[in-house]
Amino acid sequence: MTNIDPEERALIRDGFKRLLSDQCGEDDVRRTMESDKGFDPRLWQAMGEMGIIGLLVDPDFGGIGAGPVEIEMIMEEAGSALLGGPLLSSAVIAASLILASDDDDTKARLLPQIASGEKIATAALTGEKGSWLPADVSVQAEKAGESWELSGTASFVTFANVADILLVAATTLDGLKCFEIETGAAGVVIEPLETWDPSLRLSRISFSGAKAAILKDVGPDAFDQALDVARVALAGEQAGAARRIFDITTEYIMSRVQFGRPVGGFQAIKHMAADLLIEVESATSAARAAARALADDAPDKKVLINLAAFACADAFSEVAATSIQMHGGIAFTWEHVAHLYLRRARANAQLFGSSDHYREQYVTALEKAA
Amino acid sequence: MSNDKNVRTEVSKWLAENWDPDTRRSKHGESLTEWLERVVDAGWAVPSWPKEWWGKSFDKDDASAVNSEFRKMRAPGSGQDRTNIPAVTVMNFGSDAVKRKVIRDFLTGRATQCLLYSEPGAGSDLAAIRARAERDGDKYIINGQKVWTSGAMKADYGLLIARTDWDVPKHSGISFFLIEMKQPGIDVRPINQITGDSHFNEVFLDNAIVPAENLVGEEGQGWKILQAALAVERLIMGQGAGERRQGSSKSNVVSLIDIARDTGKLQDPVARQEIAQAMAYRQLNALNMARAKSEMASGVSSPIMSLGKLAMSRILHEDARVMTKLLGAASMLDGESNARSADVNYRTANAYMTSIGGGTDQIQRNIIGERVLGLPRETEVDRNMPFRESMAIKG
C-alpha cells in the first residue's frame, strides 16, 4: 500500500465526482439499469483511465496502490450517484483476492488488465443461500493432473454477466481454496437471476468438471481479508447513498407546500428529518472509522468493520425507506428517484450477509476485546 | 497551530513541576480550590481569554492543546473557557465591574452558581417566562418562581432570566441577570425526582434584589445571551455528562455483556442482537463526536455536535431497556440488597434527565431541523405580539 496524502486523496475524489456528475446522472443510471448488461462500458473505461478501478492494485501492476481509506471514499461517491456495475466485484473483491496471492506471475498476468478495466473479474464465493459463509460454499475442486476441475453451484454472484474472469471459492481435501477460470470456459454455465434492484446483476453459476487454475496461497483468511475490504467499501457506498437521498428529501420538504407552508415546517416531518440526520452522520462516521482501522491494522478493526457493516446497512435502509414516506405520493411513482435508492439499500443490506449476522459478529468481537 | 508544540512543552513542564498525576494532587499539598487558584493565576484555566482577564490570548488550537495536556495528566481546572457556562457567559456579556467581581471566584470554584431559567409555565417554551424584574434606582426588584434549578441550596450566584418589558414580543422583553442567592427574598425548596434523588429545586423570588451593574448584557438582550449559554450546555450533555457514572464506552460495554453473562443470557441470540444494537448506538455517537472534533480542528464547521444530545438520550434509554430485559423479573426488585437491579432501575428513571432536561428530545429535533437542516421554523402564535397579550398569561 502506498501512502496517499490528503491532497492527492482530495484530487482523486474530486475527479471521480466530476466524472460521475458528467456520466452518471439519474438519466444515465436509468439507461444503464434498463440496459441488457447493467453497466456502462464508456463510464467503465473512463473510470479505468482515471485509476479508480485500479485504486487498490499495486503500482507495479498498473494500479494506484491505495487502500481501504481511499476505496471507502470513492464508494461514498459511487453510492451517492447510484453507480451500477462491477466496481465492487472487480476492483475491490477480485483485486483483493489476487493481491492476497503469492503468485507474481498470476498477478502480473491479471492485475494490469483488471486495473485498467480492460478485463472484468468477479468472485463466486457464495452458495445457494447467498450467505458468504465458507460452510455454505457448494463448489468442489478436484485435482486433475496439473490442473483442477470444478463442479457444483455458486449463486448470488455479482456481475458475472459482464465478467471475463471468475474467482471461485471451492472446497478441496485441503480446505477452502480459490480458483481462476474464464467465464467462457467449457463446463461453466452462467444463468442470470432476476433482481429487484435492476442496477444490481446477480447470477447462478454451475460448474461441471470445468478446468480451473488454483490461486496460490489464497484460503479462508485471504477470503476474509478481501471481504473486509469489500465490507468497508460497501459501508462507504451505503453512507454516501444514504446522505444523497437524505439531501434530496430535505430539499423536497422545503419546497413542497401544503396547508399554505412547506411540509418541512411540520414537526411530523421535521422530526423524521432530524432522526435521519443522526443515521446519515453515524453511517459516515462508522464507514470511515472502519476504513481507517483496516488501513492501520488496528486492534479493534474487527469491531469497527462489523459495526460499519450493520450500522451502514441499517442506516441506508432506514433513510431510503423513510424518504419515500416523507415525499408522499410523488415518490410512489416509478419516475421519481427515491425508489432506486430503496432498491439499492435493500439489496446492499443483504449483499455480504444480513445486519443480524454482523450484529452477532460485533458482540463476539467485543467479547474478545473485553 | 504554529505554537502548538511550544505550548504543549510549556504546559507539560508546568504540570510536571506542580501536579502529581499518580496521587492526582497538587505537589504543594494544596486543597482543590488552592490548586484551581494556581491554575487560574498561571493562565491555564481560560487560555483563550485576553491576558488582562486571566487568560493568555491563545488561539483555539493552542487553548485546546493546553486542555489536552491537562487531561493527559488528569489535572483539573483547564478548558474552562469552553465548559464553565457561568464564567463564559459573564465574560462574554457582563460589565467590567461584574466581571472583576465574580469571574475569578467562578474559575476557582470559590463561588458556585445555579441556573434560574425554567418556570412552571415556561419549560419547552422558555421564552414564556413570567418572573419580573423591575428597575428601582440602582437596582432591580425580582418576583417570580423558578424550577429545575440544581445546586440552588449552596449556590452563591444564580444566572437569572426575567422579564423587563411586557409590551414587546416575548423574546424581546427578557433580560439576563447575575443574582446573589444568599438574600432574604430567595427561598429554595428541593424537588423529589423519580430517581429518588433531589438534585433540583424550586426557587421562589419574593422582592429579591439585583444591583443594576449585575445586568448581563443590555435590557432586552437576555434571550440571545441565554441561547449562547444553552448551546454550551447541550454540547456538554451530548458528550455524556448526563450519566451518573462518567464511565467510558468501554466500561459500559463490559456492563451490558456482564449483565447478560450473569443472568445466563449471553448465549441467547435475541439478547445478543439487542446488546449489539445498544452498544452500537453508543459507539456510533462516540465516532460521530470524534469525527466532529477532527473536522472542526481542520476548520470545517460540523453539524454533528448538535446531534449528540439527542443521540445520547436514545443511548441511555436503550441501555436501560436492554438491561431491564436481561434482568427479567429481578427488575422488579430494588434496594441495597439488589444492587444490580437498583442500578438498572436508576438508569431507567434517570435517562429522562437527558431526554427532557436541557431541552426535550422533541425540542432538540426542532433545533436540528431548523438550525442544521434549515427547515422552516415552528409557527408560534404569540411570537410577534406583545407578551402581555399572549395566552401564556391571559390563559
Image: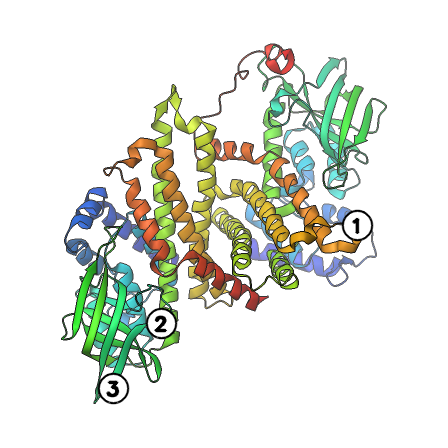
Task: Report in which chain the residue with disc 1 lies.
Answer: B
Disc 1 and disc 2: Cα gap in Å? 57 Å
Above or below, A122 relative to B95: below
Secondary element at image label 3? strand
Where residue A218 appears, as percent x and y from the top left, is 33, 78
Foreground of the two, B4 or B260:
B260
Instruction: Give the image quarter of residue B155.
Output: top right
In x, y percent, where is residue B308?
55, 44
The residue depicted at 30 percent of the width and 55 percent of the height is A12
Q: Where is mark 3, residue-wise?
A: A143
Residue B102 percent across, percent down from the top left: 75, 34
Q: Is residue A204 left or right of residue A8?
A: left
Q: Is residue A10 visible?
A: no
Which of the two discs, 2 and 3, labels the residue nearer the N terminus?
Answer: 3
* Residue wearing tag 1: B32
The one nearer the camera, B109 or B355, is B355
Q: Mark 1 falls on what kind of element?
A: helix
Q: Residues within 10 Å of mark 3 (few under 14, many from 20)?
A: some
Between label 2 and label 3, give the one nearer the viewer. 3
Q: Which residue is mark 2?
A: A223
* Label 2 SS: helix
Same chain, marks 1 and 2?
no
